[in-house]
Image: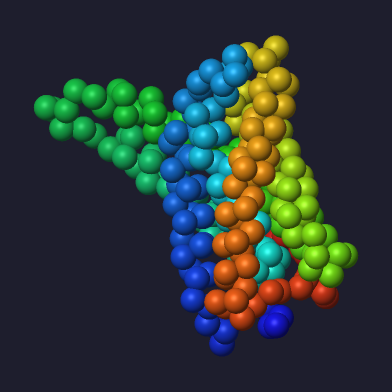
Amino acid sequence: MSAKTLSPERRYKYFFHLAMWNVILIIICIPTAGKIVNFFGFPTTVSILYFPFIYIFSDVLTEVYGYAAARRVIWYNTIAQLFTMVVFQFVAYYPPASSFHDDASYRTVLTTAPWLVCFGILAVFTGDVANNYVLAKMKVATGKTRQALRFVLSTIAGQGVNTAVYWTFGLWGLIPLRALIPSIAIGTVFKVAVEIVMLPVTLRFANFLKKAECEDYLDVGTDFNPFKF
């Protein structure tokens, strides 16, 4: 049931849709991640409420299509974030009309994008790589069994790396230093909790895709270099 690595010759029905939704969620996170809210008494980014779904998509992509295909989506995410940042800066500094009086508000929001995107790219890239690597290696080691366990453990690895990197660098100065470690812990636990709550749906969706795509990729002999497209 396993096929060769994703290629132009192999046409999948749903891969494009999964990649598209992954990129959409990434773009949504860019302008919103800088808003700090109270979450269980600790300051955190509001994007914590929807960001966990990015890693659910990563789990499904790696599980069904393999590490190399999921790695390609990581690069799509990176390109989308960089392009969004460029457009935001163009909008922020383009001279406004004399009748437009909210230009300062636009600049305040949009000019935070370079800082957020810079460390957001680093956090998403390293977290996604960790997530996908753990899942792919566990799938090889277990011979495709224990699917639920590898979904959860890979999420712990990926979300732990992502949260630590982004909270420490991207949100530096936005979250008080004394609250940083508790916020990282709460953020990671919440994201993993979302994965666990959604697990029945995620597993059913992944198994549906395996049948629909006639694919259940096993990463034997895969080049795990994260910098290949």
Residue at the image position 75 percent from the left and 60 percent from the top: 147
How many numbered discs?
A: 0
Q: From this viewpoint, which residue is outermost toward the bottom?
A: 9
Look at the image and tell me in which quarter the N terminus lies: bottom right
Question: Looking at this view, is 162 or 104 the one in front?
Answer: 162
Q: From this viewpoint, which residue is outermost toward the left?
A: 99
Above/below status of 84 relative to 188: below
Relative placement, left or right, of 91 versus 85 is left
What kind of colouring is applied to the model shown?
rainbow
Above/below status of 41 relative to 208: above
Whole-percent x, y for residue 40 in the image: 60, 19
Residue at the image position 57 percent from the left and 69 percent from the top: 208
Above/below status of 64 relative to 33: below
Q: Is residue 124 visible?
A: no
Whole-percent x, y for residue 97 in the image: 15, 32
Look at the image and tell me in which quarter the C terminus lies: bottom right
Whole-percent x, y for residue 18 in the image: 51, 62
Q: Quadrant of residue 122?
A: top right
Whole-percent x, y for residue 15 in the image: 53, 70
Relative placement, left or right, of 106 versus 223 is left
Relative placement, left or right, of 158 versus 93 is right
Residue at the image position 69 percent from the left and 69 percent from the top: 66
Q: Is residue 192 visible?
A: yes
Residue at the image position 46 percent from the left and 65 percent from the top: 17
Q: Quadrant of residue 228?
A: bottom right
